Image (cartoon, grey):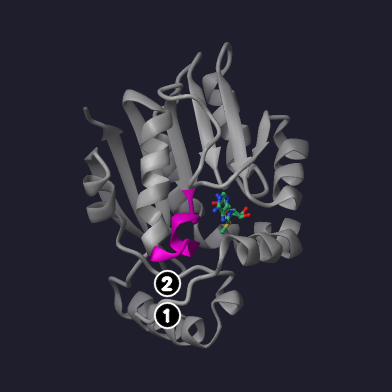
């Protein structure tokens, strides 16, 4: 597919503008995110990070699951999104790029990142996965969801139309286009524990649950 992905600066400006409206898109990905959050297997006391936390809906659920004693950090490139996430959840929030996470090595038990890798330029996805691996403890869980290729008649048709619009203007698709995550996750030094495609209202999402291997 013709690649003219958004620059990080453009993505930031777009998500600054979308802000709270992003909640309207939830219904296309909430089943996939349910699988992501379960795959992260959060338990009390864990230290987790949600990269590209958006408006912070998933943070609330994660926070409940790691209480008492645990912490969930929210990271986002957009200050507007980060403020919404913080207001909604009270989680510690950090304005940062997924490709350069400003945390020490091996500090998190788990990391989730939903619908963010699918808007990065392709060459930057290994950088982000490398940053995820660096901050995860050995054996730490990685839980991802992204838009992916269709697997049913409806989802193939929807993705075909989506790609046509993306070719015209990635901004019209809020920067997102379909990806195949699993091979990239494996190459970045993770063992895949589970991979599935979840289709909701014709919208296909790839969910990958993986563990850092050393
Ligand atoms: C499509 S939304 C997904 C939000 C949330 N994860 C969800 O699933 O509801 C993408 C989010 O990633 C953020 N984002 C985009 N590029 C990013 C980057 N390079 N690093 C960190 N966050 C980024 C956007 O500001 C936005 O909040």
Can the viewer see residue 21? no
Identify the magenta region: 114-122
Q: Which of 153 and 19 is in front in this view?
A: 19
Q: Where is residue 158 in the image (x, y as percent from the top left)?
A: 42, 80
Q: Does ligand 1 reach within 8 Å of label 1's beta carbon?
A: no
Name the residue tied to disc 1: 158
How far apart marks 2 and 1 lie (CA) works out to 7 Å
Q: Which of marks 2 and 1 is in front?
A: 1
- Give residue 82's position: percent from left, percent from top: 70, 44
Dot placed on the residue nearer the N-terminal end, 2 or 1: 1
To which residue does mark 2 refer?
202
- The quadrant of the image that shows the N terminus is bottom left
Instruction: Kindly identify which numbered label has been placed on residue 193.
Output: none
- Is residue 116 shown above or below 135? below
Residue 98 left/right relative to 22? left
Query: Which residue is painted at 48% across and 47% down in the image?
Result: 99
Query: Which quarter of the picture shows residue 74?
Result: top right
Q: Residues within 10 Å of mark 2 (few under 14, many from 20)?
A: some
Per the image, is 25 magenta?
no
* CB within 8 Å, label 2 to label 1: yes
Whether residue 130 appears in this view of the structure is: yes
200 or 162, which is in the foreground?
Answer: 162
Q: Which secondary structure, mark 1?
A: helix
Residue at 53% of width from left, 20% of height from top? 66
Q: Where is residue 214 in the image (x, y as percent from the top left)?
A: 21, 27
Q: In which quarter of the image is residue 13?
A: bottom right
In front here: 173 or 64? 173
Is 87 situated left or right of 59 in this image? right
- Disc 2 secondary structure class: loop
């Amino acid at each position: 597919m013709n690649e003219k992905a958004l620059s990080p600066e453009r993505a930031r400006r777009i998500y600054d503008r979308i802000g709270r409206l992003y909640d309207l898109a939830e219904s296309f990905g909430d089943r996939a995110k349910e699988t992501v959050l379960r795959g992260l297997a959060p338990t009390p006391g864990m230290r987790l990070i949600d990269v590209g936390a958006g408006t912070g809906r998933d943070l609330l659920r994660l926070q409940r699951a790691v209480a008492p004693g645990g912490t969930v950090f929210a990271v986002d490139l957009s200050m507007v999104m980060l403020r919404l996430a913080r207001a909604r959840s009270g989680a510690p929030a950090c304005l940062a790029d997924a490709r350069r996470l400003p945390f020490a090595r091996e500090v998190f038990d788990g990391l989730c990142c939903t619908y963010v890798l699918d808007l990065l330029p392709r060459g930057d996805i290994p950088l982000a996965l490398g940053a995820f691996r660096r901050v995860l403890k050995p054996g730490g869980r990685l839980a991802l969801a992204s838009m992916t290729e269709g697997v049913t008649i409806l989802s193939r048709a929807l993705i075909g139309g989506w790609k046509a619009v993306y070719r015209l203007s990635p901004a019209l698709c809020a920067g997102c286009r379909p990806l195949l995550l699993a091979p990239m996750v494996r190459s970045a030094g993770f063992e895949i524990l589970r991979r599935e495609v979840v289709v909701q209202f014709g919208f296909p999402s790839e969910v990958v649950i993986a563990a850092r291997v050393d």
